[in-house]
C-alpha cells in the first residue's frame, strides 16, 4: 500500500460553478487536472431548469460529471455558491481529497479556497481573464480559461500557418496588379494572448516576482535551476506561465530578455539575471 501522497496519484475533487463557467472548456480543464492526479469527484452546480445551462447537457454526459440542482431561492442571491461551499467542506472533512479543482470566476469563493489550503489541500482554480485577483492569488495555481488551448485549436493554428505561407507564396508568384488574396484565418486564442517581451518587462510585479525567485534559488555563481525557480514562485503565489501565453516558465523567462539561460532543452536548464551577471563581471565587484 502507498505510504504517502508522493507514492500515489493525487485524489482531486472537481467542483464547477456552471453559472460562471463555459461548457466548451471542460475538456481542457479535465486534461489539465488529469496531469496532476485522478479526478474522483466531478460535480457541476447550477439551476438546470434555466435555458442558459443547456450547453452543459452533453458535456455532463460525455465526461461523467454529476449535475447538482440548485434552485434560486431569491433574486440577486447566488445559492449555487453556497451549495458548492457546503459540499467542499463536506468533502474536505469526510472524503479528504488531496486537492480541489474550482471552476468559477467568482471572488466569493476566496474564503473557501483559503480555508481549503489552510487544511492542507491544494486548490487549482480555473476562470475567465477578468476573475478578481484575490481569488486568483488564493489558489495554489490559477489558469485563465482563455489560455487553455484544445487539440482542435492547435490543428487550426497549424492549418492557419500553412494557409498563410501558401498565400504569401502565391502573392509573390502573381503580378502586383492581381487582386489581393483572401485573408488567412485568425490564429487561436493562445497566440493572440501571448504578451511580447517589452510588455512583459513593463510588468513590474511580474519582473519583481521572477527576479526575486531567481535570486532566492541561485547558487554562488548566480545560476538557478528553472525548476527551483518555479517552486519558489509557487510557494509564494498562484502563477502559471500560460496565463502570459508561454507554454513553460523557461519560455517566459527567455521572452523577457532579462535573463540568461543555459542547458535549454534539458532537465538541467538554469537561469541567471542579466543584471547580476553584469555586476559580477565588474572588477572588484
Image (cartoon, rainbow, N blue to C red):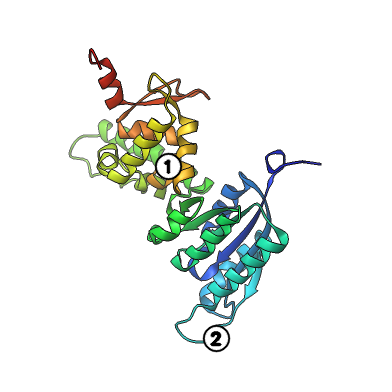
Disc 1/disc 2 C-alpha distance (Å): 40 Å
Q: Position of residue 189 (x, y in %)?
A: 40, 50
Is residue 281 among the parts visible in the rendering? Answer: yes
Quadrant location, the N terminus = top right
Q: Residue at x 39, y 43 (%)?
A: 245
Q: Position of residue 4 (x, y in %)?
A: 72, 42
Along the viewing direction, whichever of 142 and 273 lies nearer the viewer: 273
Q: Who comes first in sequence, dot 1 or dot 2?
A: 2
Q: Position of residue 154 (x, y in %)?
A: 48, 43
* Residue that label 1 marks: 241
Q: Is residue 217 left or right of residue 278?
A: right
Q: Residue at x 44, y 82 (%)?
A: 76
Dot 1, crowdedness within 10 Å: few (<14), some or many (≥20)?
Answer: some
What element does badge 2 sit on?
loop
Residue 80 higher or lower than 114, as above or below: below
Considering every residue shown, the one lying at the far bottom of the view is: 74
Q: Position of residue 255 (x, y in %)?
A: 34, 34
Quadrant location, the C terminus = top left
Residue 73 has which mark?
Answer: 2
Residue 129 higher or lower than 241, as above or below: below
What element does badge 1 sit on?
helix
Amino acid at each position: 500500500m502507498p505510504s504517502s501522497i508522493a507514492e500515489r496519484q493525487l485524489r482531486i475533487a472537481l467542483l464547477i460553478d456552471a453559472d460562471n463557467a463555459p461548457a466548451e472548456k471542460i475538456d481542457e480543464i479535465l486534461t489539465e487536472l488529469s496531469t496532476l492526479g485522478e479526478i474522483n469527484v466531478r460535480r457541476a452546480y447550477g439551476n438546470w431548469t434555466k435555458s442558459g445551462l443547456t450547453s452543459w447537457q452533453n458535456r455532463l454526459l460525455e465526461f461523467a460529471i454529476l449535475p447538482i440542482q440548485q434552485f434560486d431561492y431569491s433574486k440577486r442571491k447566488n445559492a449555487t455558491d453556497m451549495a458548492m461551499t457546503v459540499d467542499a467542506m463536506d468533502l474536505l472533512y469526510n472524503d479528504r481529497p488531496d486537492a480541489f479543482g474550482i471552476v468559477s470566476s467568482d471572488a466569493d469563493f476566496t474564503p473557501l479556497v483559503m480555508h481549503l489550503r489552510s487544511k492542507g489541500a491544494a486548490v487549482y482554480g480555473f476562470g475567465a481573464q477578468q476573475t478578481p485577483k484575490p481569488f486568483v492569488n488564493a489558489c495554489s495555481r490559477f489558469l485563465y480559461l482563455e489560455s487553455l488551448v484544445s487539440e482542435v485549436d492547435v490543428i487550426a493554428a497549424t492549418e492557419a500557418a500553412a494557409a498563410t505561407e501558401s498565400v504569401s507564396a502565391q502573392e509573390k508568384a502573381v503580378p502586383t496588379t492581381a487582386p489581393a488574396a483572401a485573408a488567412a484565418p485568425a490564429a487561436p486564442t493562445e497566440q493572440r494572448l501571448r504578451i511580447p517581451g517589452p510588455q512583459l518587462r513593463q510588468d513590474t510585479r511580474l519582473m519583481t516576482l521572477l527576479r526575486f525567485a531567481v535570486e532566492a534559488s541561485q547558487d554562488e555563481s548566480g545560476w538557478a535551476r528553472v525548476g527551483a525557480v518555479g517552486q519558489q514562485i509557487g510557494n509564494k503565489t498562484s502563477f502559471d506561465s500560460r496565463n502570459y501565453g508561454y507554454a513553460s516558465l523557461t519560455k517566459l523567462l527567455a521572452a523577457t530578455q532579462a535573463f540568461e539561460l543555459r542547458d535549454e532543452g534539458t532537465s538541467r536548464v538554469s537561469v541567471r539575471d542579466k543584471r547580476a551577471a553584469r555586476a559580477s563581471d565588474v572588477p572588484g565587484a
